[in-house]
Amino acid sequence: MFRALRLKQAPVKVAPEPKTISIEQWLGDAQYPLAIRTINTLSHDAKQRFYRTLIPPELLGQLGINPILWRGNGYAVELFADPESGKVNLSINNPEDTRDAYFVLELQDNSTNGIDLNLILLNDPFAEKFGIEYDADGHATQWGTITRNLVEEERAQRAGLAPAQVRAGMGFSREVLNQLDVFLALCARQAISLEPLTYVSAWIFEKRGFAYVRGHKLMDDIHREFQPGGKLHAALDHSTPFRHPDAWQTVRGRAWAIHDGILETIGERWRDLRMIKVVGKHAGVETFPEAKY
């Protein structure tokens, strides 16, 4: 399973600056960082060659998509990589509804010789869909961060999903992040950065080797206060369907309570966390020891 990441709210300065090096120059120096913006100046076919490394072939094979042609079984991989942009977006959508994404991966240059992972979705196309992305009035919820569809969220919770999930996960989170390591090494970039959208996202990224640039103390505070005798534990009072008294015992239970605003009990909100992983290294961070999902 995997969750979405927070979308960036402001543009990020890119590095290296565009057009400071050509592909020919880059090929002559294996240690020179290659920007997404530079790759995006290439022809579509050349860009596709680079960005093929980002999607695990076994993921494509499970959907019946040819990993070379990027299409098959009624599906197609969509590539958005505008020539003047430092951003790339890869997606596989429901052929009958392009707003219904099964796979999305969006990367962007940053100013620290790394790459930002803006968004990732891994949704099982064969699983039931829950309408959490729109509220009762038809307004986009941004995965419940702006407004919420409580009826659909409760249905999703009962079905075993976590906050921000519209379907059960497809899996492949480990494989996708391994491919990201390959892509960063190819481009001579040092690290991947992101903002976890939910508590579950943060926990999964810990397991995948990420550490906190911001938010480690909050995660430690959350774990402490969810223990019996803590303020968060006491706030699991069944006042809403998302605050079951046993929720503190699992990652998913905690995540729903946090999504429901329980952090206000300790004067906090789920915001401004940032995580990073250096290529080829596992940070070994564990803020919920021996956690059960």
Image (cartoon, grey):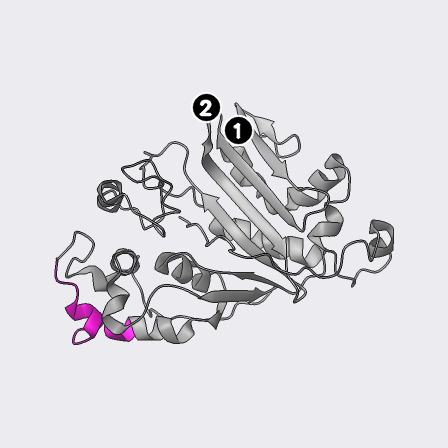
**What's the residue type where badge 2 is placed?**
Glu
Q: Quadrant of residue 127?
A: top left
Q: CA distance from mark 1 to mark 2?
A: 17 Å
Describe residue 180's horizontal placement relative to residue 283 as left or right.
right
Check disc 1: other Cα within 10 Å, few if <14, some if 14-19, many if 20+.
some
Mark 1: secondary structure: loop
Magenta-tinted stretch: 223-238
Q: Is residue 61 visible?
A: yes
User: Nearest the camera: 62 or 19?
Assistant: 19
Q: Is residue 210 visible?
A: no
Closer to the observer: label 1 or label 2? 2
Disc assigned to residue 64: 1
**What's the residue type where badge 1 is placed?**
Gly
* Residue 280: % across, % down: 60, 64
Q: Indicate whether residue 278 is drawn in magenta.
A: no
The reply to whether discs 1 and 2 touch (Cβ–Cβ < 8 Å) is: no
Disc assigned to residue 43: none
Count the marks: how many?
A: 2
Describe residue 210's horizontal placement relative to residue 186 as left or right.
left
Q: Give the quadrant of the C terminus.
A: bottom left
* Residue 121: % across, % down: 46, 45
Check disc 2: other Cα within 10 Å, few if <14, some if 14-19, many if 20+.
few
Which residue is under mark 2?
Answer: 96
Q: Which sits earlier in the primary sequence, circle 1 or circle 2?
A: 1
Determine the residue positioned at 30% across, 60% down. 251
Q: Indicate whether residue 235 is drawn in magenta.
A: yes
* Residue 30: % across, % down: 80, 60
Q: Quadrant of residue 111?
A: bottom right
Determine the residue positioned at 49% across, 34% down. 62
Q: Quadrant of residue 16?
A: bottom right
Determine the residue positioned at 56% across, 48% down. 106
Compared with 180, 69 (above or below) is above
